[in-house]
Image (tube, helix red, strand yellow):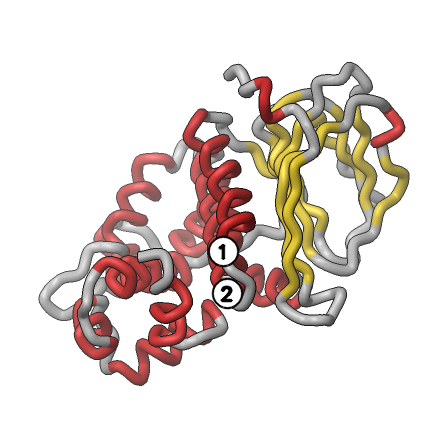
Amino acid sequence: MNIPAELFHNDTAHRSLSADPVNGILSCGFLVKPTDHFSHDTMLFSHYGAFLLLSGSGRYSDPSGREVELTPGCFVQRMPGKPHVTEVTPDGKWLEFYVCFGRDYFTYMADQGLLSRQPVLFHSLTPALVDSCRALLERFRTVPEGRNFSLFLSMQEFVVTLTQTALQERLTGWDDALTRASELLCVPGEEGYPSPVAVAEQMGMEYETFRKRFRAAFGCPPSAYQMQYRLNESKRLLLDTHLSVQEIADTCCFSDGFAYSKAFRRFYGLSPVQFRKSFSYFV
């Protein structure tokens, strides 16, 4: 696709969640790298960084011997403590959209299966994806100071969505079965959401085979995928309705409001009530 010409300049925004340089960093924006001066010898980030290559080409490599040709649509993760090299083809075409946030947030999200530890993922480049980059940067410009955690939540959703979509796009022969399984996990019945074991049985698979195939395809186990769906649905209800926390817990099939609030805080770092208040300025 053709990237709008007006994006080809450095345009970044920076906030802080705390004074901690490793975990408080919060930044995103567009960067151009027109010459090989922007190629980097071994880099080592203490925080988490990533970029989506929108235009241009190059190469990623690391000490393990991994080498990946970079083309538009590549999502490159600069994981904390992992040395790597990025080389820029010096043809003046390079444009990236980058994000940075704290090391501990990345570690927790990766441990929960929300983010991948694969350093380079591949994503179809679409106008909607470019628009989502622009929208995130615009939020950094417009969100008042004091609401920086809401920016982190927006960045978290951007990176998780990008990661999960990229992982889905690499599905191969198991496409239909695993896509169907992912749909079944997200459809509640009279007794709530089906267990991953029940979905595996419905798909005619041994559970361990199903779990391993599902994780390879989506980057997280079926239980984490289902929980993320339920919590995303609850976020929508928190922002788009006036339902109470207990009513949202019932709608999303949690045993009670306490169990829902505990799961929400574990994933997002704040309670449903705090989340609703953080975003109430915008809704």
Residue 167 percent location from the top left of the image: 49, 41
Q: Residues within 10 Å of mark 2 (few under 14, many from 20)?
A: some
**Number of numbered callouts drawn:** 2
Q: Residue at x 45, y 26 (%)?
A: 126
Q: Is residue 260 left or right of residue 36?
A: left
Q: Looking at the rendered structure, which numbered label has been put on residue 269?
A: none
Q: Residue at x 32, y 51 (%)?
A: 205
Q: Is residue 68 left or right of residue 206?
A: right
Residue 202 percent location from the top left of the image: 22, 53
Q: Residue under circle 2?
A: 147
Q: Residue at x 55, y 43 (%)?
A: 137
Residue 87 percent location from the top left of the image: 81, 30
Instruction: Give whichever of 239, 46 is nearer the camera.
Output: 239
Q: Residues within 10 Å of mark 1 (few under 14, many from 20)?
A: some
Q: Can you say which quadrant of the picture contains the C terminus?
A: bottom left
Q: Is residue 241 left or right of residue 276?
A: left
Real-space CA distance between mark 1 and mark 2, rounded to the nearest whole angstrom? 7 Å
Residue type at the position of mark 2: Arg
Query: Does residue 55 lie above or below 188 as drawn?
Result: above
Instruction: Give whichever of 60, 146 is nearer the camera.
Output: 146
Query: Does residue 147 lie above or below 210 as drawn?
Result: below
> Is residue 112 visible from the viewing direction of this image?
yes
Residue at disc 2, secondary structure? loop
Residue type at the position of mark 1: Val
Q: Quadrant of residue 101?
A: bottom right
> Is residue 100 visible from the viewing direction of this image?
no
Q: Is residue 60 left or right of residue 271?
A: right
Residue 130 percent location from the top left of the image: 50, 31
Q: Residue under circle 1?
A: 143
Query: Does residue 229 lie above or below 104 as drawn?
Result: above
Please report contact status of discs 1 and 2: CB closer than 8 Å, yes or no.
yes
